[in-house]
Amino acid sequence: MKLFTFPRGGVHPPDHKAPSAHQSIRLLPLPGQVAIAMNQHLGKPAKCLVKKGQDLTVGEKIGEADGFISASVHSSVAGKVSRVDPAMTAVGTWADTVFIDVDNEATAAGYRAFTNQTPADWRQMDSREMIGKIQVAGIVGMGGAAFPTNVKLSPPPDKTIDTILINGAECEPYLTADHQLMLERSADLLAGIGIMQRILGIENTWIGIEANKPDAIAVLEKLITDGNHPGIRVAPLKTRYPQGGEKQLITAVTGRVVPSGKLPFEVGCLVQNTGTAIAIYEAVCLDKPLIDRITTITGFVKQPGNFRIPIGVAFDHAIDSGAGGFIDAGRVRAVINGGPMMGKTVRTIDIGTMKGTSGILVLADTDYNTKPEGPCIRCGRCIDGCPMGLMPTSLALHAEFNKSAGLKDVMDCIECGTCSYVCPTHRQLVHWLRIGKTIFRNADRS
Amino acid sequence: MNMKRIVIASSPHIHSEDTLHRVMYDVVIALIPAMIISTVFFGLRVLAVMGIAVISAVLFEAGFLKLAGHDRIRSTAFDGSAIIAGLLLAFNVPPTCPFWIVIIGSFIAIVVTKHTFGGLGYNLFNPALVGRIFLLISFPVQMTAWTKPTFWKADALSGATPLGVLKTEGLAAVQDMFSIQSNFIGTIPGCLGEISAAALLIGAGYLLVRKVISWHIPVFFLGTLAVFTGLFWLIDSGTYANPLFHIVSGGAILGAFFMATDMVTSPLTRNGQMIFGFGCGLLTGIIRLFGGYPEGVAFAILLMNATVPLIDRYTEVKKVGL
Ligand code: SF4
Ligand code: SF4
């Protein structure tokens, strides 16, 4: 089998996927309260529409998209707003947050109503209507970056998209949610792809899947041969991090290179994560807003698995009621929103999950082998490992000494974490590069 | 819930098993075959030389860190880098070298060469090589008192190294006294650690397999040396030794695999490393064939160390999407 891969750098960390792989998607028992933040997406936070005491139904809009790069937010439960306050969110910033006391029965009924209806036929809809539904549903990229999906599907008029890439690489260690989605919801995934093809008026589509998920590759390869799915092909990818990086995936599959500082449509590509494609199907055919998602809860927990989580359920509730709790709370060192390479550590575990929460990863003291930062011994491993062809060690030094002149390449860093991962002296290269980006932006502005 | 020790940290949250200690101790492990051969051929005294070099290097390192008010003195002094500097210094002196001279070399390597530039990672020159050159210039008699190796004891008769004989008495004399095989195995007079090409190559293979070093510097170093000396040999094989002789003699193997590959003092990128290796090989050849000293490896590497900032500047990797 020919495996596609990106041309330079990368690593292959131990994948730790076995504990949650092939665990069928489970539902979480509902919590007493959910906390839904207005900054579920990249771009401007949504404007909150609700007040204390207000009654809400499942899927009711509670935040209005504010500007072009923004997305609406909906209630993931039925219940009563107990308060609206700024609060710390799982991405590490503060945002207006709606706290909703959950009405269990009404919530369950609300979800049933979405699933029990007959899906509308997207083949009868036109592109305007479908993009409208996607926008109304507040769909954002669900691989982690949470970029508003309708924006991606509306390229500027002077650009044409000729290739759709579905990102099923799931290259982050530990995470298995996309894998399980491809197995359990393959038909919905293909419908989501069909919708995108219709919106863009093209057929050429690749589904990129890392070779460590042979069953997902086999299932999809079989389904696409039925004649109803023109233009779709499966691209088996070499298992190598960050194969699922947007630019890496594009180059791996199409051979095209996104120019520095440009977006994928520059080379005619649209990349969407598998979870997003399914959310698109639900928005267009079921009029269901993005109010829940599939998330892997794994690591130092008793029963790792893949769960359907209403947005806003607290991390601790998800861990306790879904994954059986921590193995030993005293040994927990970090709880991560996302995967171990690019996810963010949460400050407290009583905050709500988000549209971008692809995983809840608990790391114990023994997993957490980061040591104090040492000096650079100039071994060059970070340079060999960088998939973007940067010189992480030099950029980090310039950031450390606040020299904006040497930082011109820093904006190309995709923060994949490969450089920090391989550095033998445990230099926090990504951390320095993030600081470098701020230094560069400030210098650029003045 | 007891979650006091939950950390807030920048991604990534996992790390490869590689550490500075692992990299450094891999180098120490790779030097073991040469240490054994040296002890077998020159006797137990070389163990004392190596021991004194290592211990003094670690003590100088710890002492300097203490004076500088450094925290984590113990872990830094034993990070392996001082041990390697000490060992390589010992490898670069004759087996008869007086102990006090070894200690002076250690001081030059650790305090002057490494720490005045800012310590590990910041030194421009290879510490052990600066130590060697300093000693060679300051104590020329003791530093060129060669003995022939015999099993377990150094021969009291002083000998001369193959490169020394070549320089002073010419090619015919070398061919009479030494065979390529003896050069390869190590039954020749020379510095303590450089005599046995075979033992060093075993260690080098280990470093390559463990990916501590890459092939770029050694291959370009030895390749250039071979081509350069080979050209002269082709022109006049009565005067010039063949390239194989040059590769297995003196410090070429030790230098190419263990000293020129020192990460701190060699270029960052692969392209830079190839240029660096080329320069080392060329300079070694020029010094050996036309210079005043019989051996040129140490000078060549140090000269190339000085060019590293320049090489780095012109060999930055090309970013994706340019
Ligand atoms: S510099 Fe950026 S893109 Fe390169 S390896 Fe590091 S995090 Fe990844
Ligand atoms: S991996 Fe670490 S030690 Fe090696 S060059 Fe990069 S920053 Fe320096």
Image (cartoon, coloured by chain):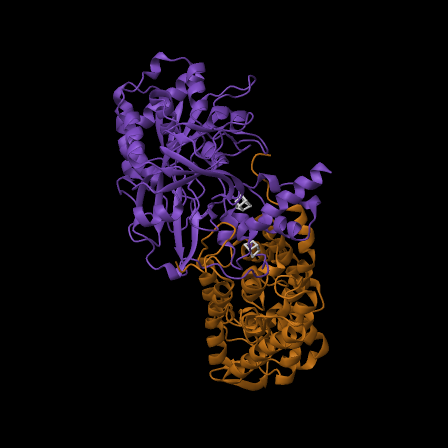
Residue A438, how many percent across, how many down?
A: 64, 43
Ligand 1 quadrant assignment: top right
Instruction: Point out the image quarter for the C terminus of chain B.
Output: top right
* Res. B245 in view: no
Instruction: Point out the image quarter for the N terminus of chain B.
Output: bottom left
Left or right? Give the position of B201 relative to A300.
right
Relative to A433, residue B47 above or below: below
Chain letter, colour orange in render = B
The colour chain A appears in is: purple
Name the residue nearer the viewer: A196 or B321.
A196
Name the residue nearer the viewer: B198 or A136.
A136
Residue A20, how many percent across, how many down?
A: 30, 46
Residue A352, how many percent across, how many down?
A: 43, 42
Relative to B5, residue A297 above or below: above
Left or right? Give the position of B125 relative to A228.
right
Q: Which residue in the rendered view is the most extreme toward the bottom?
A: B156
Q: Which residue in the rendered view is the most extreme toward the front?
A: A53
Relative to A268, residue B178 above or below: below
